[in-house]
Amino acid sequence: MGSCTSARCRYEGNLLRSEWSNASNPVKTRIQAQTSQNVEYNGFWRACKHLYRTEGASVFARGLGPNLIRSFPSNAAIFYVYEVLMKTSNDYLKTKRSNK
Protein backbone atom coordinates (compact mmCIF):
# COMPACT_ATOMS: atom_id res chain seq x y z
CA MET A 1 0.00 0.00 0.00
CA GLY A 2 1.40 3.39 -0.96
CA SER A 3 1.91 6.16 1.54
CA CYS A 4 -0.88 8.30 0.02
CA THR A 5 -3.34 5.41 0.21
CA SER A 6 -2.23 4.67 3.75
CA ALA A 7 -2.62 8.31 4.78
CA ARG A 8 -6.08 8.45 3.21
CA CYS A 9 -7.16 5.29 5.05
CA ARG A 10 -5.92 6.71 8.34
CA TYR A 11 -7.72 10.01 7.71
CA GLU A 12 -10.99 8.30 6.82
CA GLY A 13 -10.73 6.00 9.83
CA ASN A 14 -10.13 8.97 12.10
CA LEU A 15 -13.06 10.81 10.53
CA LEU A 16 -15.37 7.87 11.14
CA ARG A 17 -14.17 7.46 14.73
CA SER A 18 -14.67 11.15 15.40
CA GLU A 19 -18.20 11.09 13.99
CA TRP A 20 -19.22 8.14 16.16
CA SER A 21 -17.61 9.41 19.34
CA ASN A 22 -18.98 12.92 18.82
CA ALA A 23 -22.56 11.65 18.63
CA SER A 24 -22.48 10.65 22.29
CA ASN A 25 -21.23 14.04 23.52
CA PRO A 26 -24.64 15.81 23.68
CA VAL A 27 -26.12 12.84 25.54
CA LYS A 28 -23.22 12.70 27.99
CA THR A 29 -23.39 16.44 28.58
CA ARG A 30 -27.13 16.40 29.28
CA ILE A 31 -26.84 13.48 31.70
CA GLN A 32 -23.97 15.17 33.55
CA ALA A 33 -25.80 18.49 33.74
CA GLN A 34 -28.93 17.14 35.42
CA THR A 35 -29.29 17.49 39.17
CA SER A 36 -30.54 14.94 41.67
CA GLN A 37 -33.69 17.05 42.15
CA ASN A 38 -34.37 17.25 38.43
CA VAL A 39 -33.68 13.86 36.82
CA GLU A 40 -34.85 14.15 33.24
CA TYR A 41 -32.80 11.36 31.70
CA ASN A 42 -32.87 7.87 33.18
CA GLY A 43 -30.06 6.16 31.29
CA PHE A 44 -28.08 6.68 28.12
CA TRP A 45 -30.50 5.15 25.59
CA ARG A 46 -33.53 6.90 27.08
CA ALA A 47 -31.63 10.17 26.83
CA CYS A 48 -30.82 9.39 23.18
CA LYS A 49 -34.47 8.73 22.41
CA HIS A 50 -35.61 11.87 24.23
CA LEU A 51 -33.07 14.09 22.47
CA TYR A 52 -33.95 12.61 19.08
CA ARG A 53 -37.68 13.15 19.64
CA THR A 54 -37.37 16.67 20.99
CA GLU A 55 -34.45 18.12 18.99
CA GLY A 56 -34.11 15.86 15.95
CA ALA A 57 -31.17 13.92 14.56
CA SER A 58 -29.04 17.05 14.17
CA VAL A 59 -28.49 17.14 17.94
CA PHE A 60 -26.01 14.28 17.56
CA ALA A 61 -23.88 16.22 15.05
CA ARG A 62 -23.48 19.37 17.13
CA GLY A 63 -19.86 20.27 17.64
CA LEU A 64 -18.59 17.84 15.00
CA GLY A 65 -16.86 20.52 12.92
CA PRO A 66 -14.72 21.94 15.76
CA ASN A 67 -14.01 18.42 16.98
CA LEU A 68 -12.65 17.40 13.57
CA ILE A 69 -10.63 20.60 13.23
CA ARG A 70 -9.12 19.99 16.67
CA SER A 71 -8.39 16.30 16.20
CA PHE A 72 -6.98 16.31 12.66
CA PRO A 73 -3.60 18.00 13.37
CA SER A 74 -2.89 15.93 16.46
CA ASN A 75 -3.76 12.67 14.72
CA ALA A 76 -1.67 13.65 11.70
CA ALA A 77 1.32 14.27 13.98
CA ILE A 78 0.81 10.95 15.76
CA PHE A 79 0.66 9.01 12.50
CA TYR A 80 3.67 10.86 11.09
CA VAL A 81 5.79 10.01 14.14
CA TYR A 82 4.57 6.40 13.98
CA GLU A 83 5.55 6.09 10.32
CA VAL A 84 9.00 7.63 10.95
CA LEU A 85 9.64 5.32 13.92
CA MET A 86 8.52 2.25 11.97
CA LYS A 87 10.74 3.14 9.01
CA THR A 88 13.70 3.87 11.29
CA SER A 89 13.31 0.63 13.24
CA ASN A 90 12.86 -1.42 10.05
CA ASP A 91 15.97 0.15 8.51
CA TYR A 92 17.92 -0.52 11.71
CA LEU A 93 16.82 -4.15 11.83
CA LYS A 94 17.71 -4.66 8.17
CA THR A 95 21.24 -3.33 8.71
CA LYS A 96 21.64 -5.48 11.86
CA ARG A 97 20.60 -8.60 9.96
CA SER A 98 22.82 -7.86 6.97
CA ASN A 99 25.87 -7.40 9.25
CA LYS A 100 25.52 -10.90 10.72
Image (tube, grey):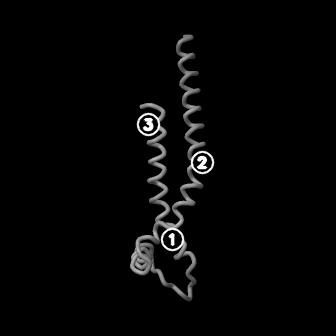
Between disc 1 and disc 3, the foreground one is: 3
Q: Amino acid at mark 3?
A: Thr
> Which disc is residue 73 wearing?
2
Q: Earlier in the sequence, mark 1 or mark 3?
A: 3
- Tell me the CA gap for discs 2 and 3: 18 Å
Q: Residue at 51% x, 68% y: name it.
A: 62
Apparent side of residue 18 relative to residue 52 in the rendered image (left or right): right
Marks 1 and 3, how far apart at CA: 33 Å
**Residue situated furthest bottom in the rendering:** 37
Residue 88: image location, x then y, percent: 58, 26
Question: Label 1 is placed on what type of residue?
Answer: Pro
Local SS, label 3? helix
| 10 Å crowding of disc 1: few (<14), some (14-19), many (20+) | some
Q: Can you tell which quarter of the image residue 95 is in?
A: top right
Disc 2 to disc 1: CB gap under 8 Å? no
Question: Against 72, is 43 above or below?
Answer: below
The location of residue 37, given as percent across then percent down, is 56, 88
Near mark 2 (Cα within 10 A), the count class, few <14, some 14-19 or many ≥20, is few
Residue 5 has which mark? Answer: 3
**Residue picked out by circle 1:** 26
